[in-house]
């Protein structure tokens, strides 16, 4: 099993450009999450989904949109990238709710916005 | 905020020594989790300890939880160079999982 796969691994954007980060999981998990990791800040939750067709805001949702059209995929979109969105983005999934199940993480997408 | 905070921020030891990392948090929790992150990789789940548990073991890992002090510790015994990584605690309250900033562990051969 591949687990959680994120594409792309690296991306450089210019301010104002848009892009979509793709997360795919093959564990039939209901719950999926997008985090960003910045130096000295730990991981912060951007958006999450508790099932196909549902999404919810996390701690830092501004400037991002998400969609969960299929259970196995969770997309993170940046409509107009800003330098403040330079970060490493991690997708995660879990089989249970209320965080009583461990999260399984992808290996991240390193995004630079110039 | 119920964010966990790890201590120390960085720890450097020799192979074979034990490594202890601490996590403190501010509000009541449902459970507490520890994760490891190798450089350039995603986080990997190590242990989940529930609020009604005091100690849990997994191989060379031992986690304790003291809800009265709002703190947890992760002990890695007989450390190896491969244990070099960042270690994060994550606290679970009612509905959110909040990560601390991590402890960077360096194990030298």
Image (cartoon, rainbow, N blue to C red):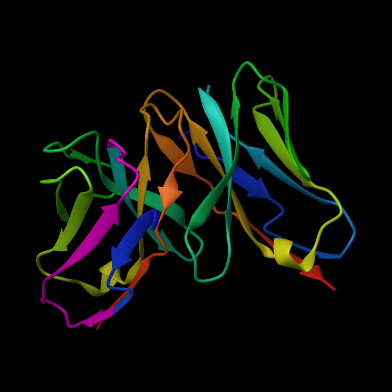
- Tell how many labels: 0
Percent across and percent down for residue A20 are 16, 66
Magenta stretch? Answer: A11-30
Q: Residue at x 27, y 79 (%)?
A: A11
Quarter residue A2 falls in: bottom left
Q: Is residue B46 above or below residue A111?
A: above
**Which quadrant: the C terminus of chain B?**
bottom right
Residue placed most toward the observer, B71 or A32:
A32
The residue located at (31%, 51%) in the rendering is: A25
Q: Position of residue A12 (x, y in %)?
A: 25, 82
Q: Residue A3: image x %, image y %?
A: 39, 53
Image quarter in which the N terminus of chain B is found: top left
Is A71 positioned to the left or the right of B23 in the image?
left
Q: Nearer the viewer, residue A73 or B6?
A: A73
Quarter of image, res B5 = top right
Q: Does the stretch in magenta take in A25?
A: yes
The residue drawn where x is 90% and y is 60% is: B16
A18 or A1, which is in the foreground?
A1
Residue found at the far front of this picture:
A1
Name the residue rendered at 52%, 34% in the picture: B91
């Amino acid at each position: 099993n591949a687990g959680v796969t994120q594409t792309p691994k690296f991306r450089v954007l210019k301010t104002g450009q848009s892009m979509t980060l793709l997360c795919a999981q093959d564990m039939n998990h209901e719950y999926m999450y997008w985090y960003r990791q910045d130096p000295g800040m730990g991981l912060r939750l951007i958006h999450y989904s508790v099932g196909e067709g549902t999404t919810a805001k996390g701690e830092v949702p501004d400037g991002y949109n998400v969609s969960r059209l299929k259970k196995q995929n969770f997309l993170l979109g940046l409509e107009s990238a800003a330098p403040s969105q330079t970060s490493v983005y991690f997708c995660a999934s879990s089989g249970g709710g209320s965080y009583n199940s461990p999260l399984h993480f992808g290996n991240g997408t390193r995004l630079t916005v110039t | 905020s119920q964010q966990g905070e790890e201590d120390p921020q960085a720890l450097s030891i020799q192979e074979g020594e034990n490594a202890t990392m601490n996590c403190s948090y501010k509000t009541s929790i449902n459970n507490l989790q520890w994760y490891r992150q190798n450089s350039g990789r995603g986080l990997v789940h190590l242990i989940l300890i529930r609020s009604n548990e005091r100690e849990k073991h997994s191989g060379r890992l031992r986690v304790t939880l003291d809800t009265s002090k709002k703190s947890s510790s992760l002990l890695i015994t007989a450390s190896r160079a491969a244990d070099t990584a960042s270690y994060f605690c994550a606290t679970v309250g009612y509905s959110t999982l909040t990560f601390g900033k991590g402890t960077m562990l360096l194990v030298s051969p």
